[in-house]
């Protein structure tokens, strides 16, 4: 069925890894273009497309379907990672239809080194970053001495700007490690060659995208990370360095707000978090272990075991507000099989009072006590059985799962349009055909 939705944003409402990759691939079936607008190779998006598993760090998840994919200006680019991803896709027989923004910023080896050093010195305020140089690259962008893709593909500019930046970064790194040194010419030669290889993909993506929207193309904006990791509205300082929510789209892709037609928020049936920082509904016992194993909760980028806990509707409500979510997708319900009872956090208590809104500040959150409702769980089933159920639709889900989903929908006062009970595209139960 066709509708008037031409641009749709897919955004994680928690601490990332909600299943954005799976659903960007899903929605991309109807799209012309898929766009990444923030983050870099800190992201790890898994897509199981036509039975083949892909893991993307930078390339938008529309790539397995050979859709046009755009990496817009708000992203930070590790050229080596990007070239590897392009090569991997080609080796798998895929056509790569990529456009890369000339104004995206470039990650250099000294950014990755600084990421590690700064993390160490932050002590209890460390976010447990992926050490991919994300924070230091965004810092240089804001300080206005960052190097952009345009510089990368112009060797003369690259030489001048890299030498200047290198000298500054060397002084900084030497504060932590007085003996650190690197040959700037070696970095230059390596990056000049990356620039040469990436040049054919580089354009002004904002012009391109606005024209595409005006001509009625269907576009999916793929969020990376999740709302609670966002720099402005996440759980500062335990997050990432970009606006990991729909607010990042306008600046990160050059799209005026009124050109965004729809916002879809992705939530997990429980919560996961990789890295440091508060996690009010975290669980540590054998139940956590069971969820981690059943949901394969190990970081896509770093392989770290993800921390797990109960679903936190209080912080999801905050994410719905910040993102203006129209509809929700809930994932990984199958991974809760065999766990009884299940808990849903509906709010926080602080000093004997029930809070009206999510408290945002880490120093306050750490004093809050989650309030839970308990639900009956569902029995384990084989992977094949979950797939069979998905084909038959919502009525075939276990009654207790339906109750769980409907309770979440009611509590959040936002429609759940899609339910996901497996990693494959087909393991999906559509409640509303008219999402995109
Ligand atoms: P993203 O960063 O939001 O794209 O999510 P990740 O790819 O990092 O992590 C989500 C993981 O869950 C991936 O391995 C997906 O293949 C998988 N996944 C997504 N939806 C479901 C689901 O409903 N059930 C199960 N069992 N796995 C899922
Ligand atoms: P996707 O897109 C989960 C976390 C890191 C760390 C913090 C800052 O797959 O959902 P950074 O390297 O960005 O400076 O790290 O953010 N983090 C993620 N956690 N999923 C991600 O991406 C993440 N990207 C960053 O663990 O706590
Ligand atoms: Mg991920």
Image (cartoon, rainbow, N blue to C red):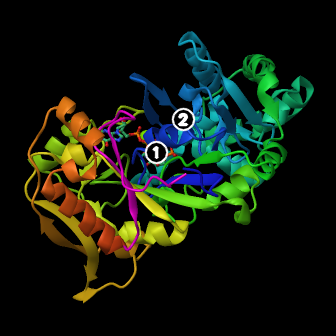
- Decide which of tag 1 and tag 2 comes sooner along the chain: 1
Magenta: main secondary structure: loop
Q: Residue furthest right?
A: 156
Left of 321 or right of it: where is 270? Answer: left
Q: Residue furthest bottom?
A: 353
Magenta span covers which residues? 413-436
Q: Is mark 2 within 8 Å of ligand 1?
A: yes
Residue assigned mark 2: 61
Q: In the rendered structure, does residue 62 fall within the stretch colored magenta?
A: no
How far from the left and from the top, in percent, is residue 192? 79, 20
Q: Nearer the viewer, residue 400 or 288?
A: 400
Left of 13 or right of it: where is 144? Answer: right
Q: Residue at x 81, y 22 (%)?
A: 200
Left of 104 or right of it: where is 88? Answer: left
Q: Residue furthest front?
A: 1
How far from the left and from the top, in percent, is residue 43? 50, 39
Compared to residue 30, the image places residue 319 above or below, namely below
Q: Quadrant of residue 368?
A: bottom left
Q: Residue at x 15, y 51 (%)?
A: 398
How far from the left and from the top, in percent, is residue 159? 86, 27
Q: Is mark 1 within 8 Å of ligand 1?
A: yes
How far from the left and from the top, in percent, is residue 394? 27, 52
Q: Nearer the viewer, residue 11 or 225?
A: 11
Q: Quadrant of residue 309?
A: bottom left
Q: Quadrant of residue 95?
A: top right
Residue assigned mark 1: 20
Pointer 1 with pointer 2, Cβ within 8 A = yes
Q: Report helix, strand or loop for mark 2.
A: loop
Q: In the rendered structure, does residue 429 fall within the stretch colored magenta?
A: yes
- Callout 2: few (<14), some (14-19), or many (20+) C-alpha neighbours within 10 Å? many
């Amino acid at each position: 069925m066709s509708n008037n939705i031409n641009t749709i944003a897919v955004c994680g409402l928690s601490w990332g890894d909600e299943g954005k990759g799976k659903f960007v691939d899903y929605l991309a079936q109807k799209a012309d273009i898929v766009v990444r607008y923030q983050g870099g190779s800190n992201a790890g998006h898994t897509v199981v497309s036509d039975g083949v598993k892909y893991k993307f760090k930078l390339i938008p998840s529309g790539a397995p379907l050979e859709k046009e994919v755009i990496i817009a200006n708000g992203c930070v680019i590790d050229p080596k990672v990007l070239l590897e991803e392009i090569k991997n896709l080609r080796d798998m027989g895929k056509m790569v239809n990529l456009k890369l923004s000339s104004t995206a910023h470039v990650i250099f080896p000294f950014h990755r080194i600084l990421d590690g050093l700064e993390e160490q010195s932050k002590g209890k305020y460390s976010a447990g970053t992926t050490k991919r140089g994300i924070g230091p690259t965004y810092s240089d962008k804001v300080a206005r001495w960052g190097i952009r893709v345009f510089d990368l593909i112009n060797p003369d500019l690259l030489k001048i700007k890299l030498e200047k930046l290198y000298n500054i970064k060397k002084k900084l790194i030497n504060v932590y490690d007085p003996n650190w040194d690197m040959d700037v010419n070696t970095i230059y030669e390596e990056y000049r060659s990356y620039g040469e290889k990436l040049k054919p993909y580089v354009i002004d993506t904002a012009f391109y995208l606005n024209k595409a929207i005006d001509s009625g193309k269907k576009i999916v904006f793929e969020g990376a990370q999740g709302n609670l990791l966002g720099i402005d509205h996440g759980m500062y300082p335990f997050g990432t360095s970009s606006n990991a929510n729909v607010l990042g789209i306008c600046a990160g892709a050059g799209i005026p707000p009124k050109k965004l037609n729809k916002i879809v928020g992705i939530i997990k049936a429980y919560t996961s978090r990789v890295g440091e920082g508060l996690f009010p509904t975290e669980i540590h016992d054998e139940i956590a272990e069971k969820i981690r194993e059943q949901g394969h909760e190990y970081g896509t980028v770093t392989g770290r075991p993800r921390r797990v806990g109960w679903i936190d509707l209080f912080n999801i409500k905050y994410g719905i507000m910040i993102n203006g979510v129209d509809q929700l997708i809930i994932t990984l319900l199958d991974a809760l099989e065999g766990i009884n009872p299940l808990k849903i956090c509906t709010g926080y208590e602080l000093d004997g009072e029930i809070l009206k809104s999510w408290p945002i500040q880490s120093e306050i959150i750490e004093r809050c006590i989650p309030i839970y409702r308990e639900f009956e769980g569902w029995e384990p089933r084989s992977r094949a059985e979950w797939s069979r159920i998905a084909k038959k639709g919502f009525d075939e889900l276990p009654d207790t799962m339906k109750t769980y989903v409907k309770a979440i929908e009611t509590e959040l006062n936002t429609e759940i349009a899609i339910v996901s009970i497996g990693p494959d595209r087909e393991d999906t139960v559509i409640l509303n055909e008219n999402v995109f």
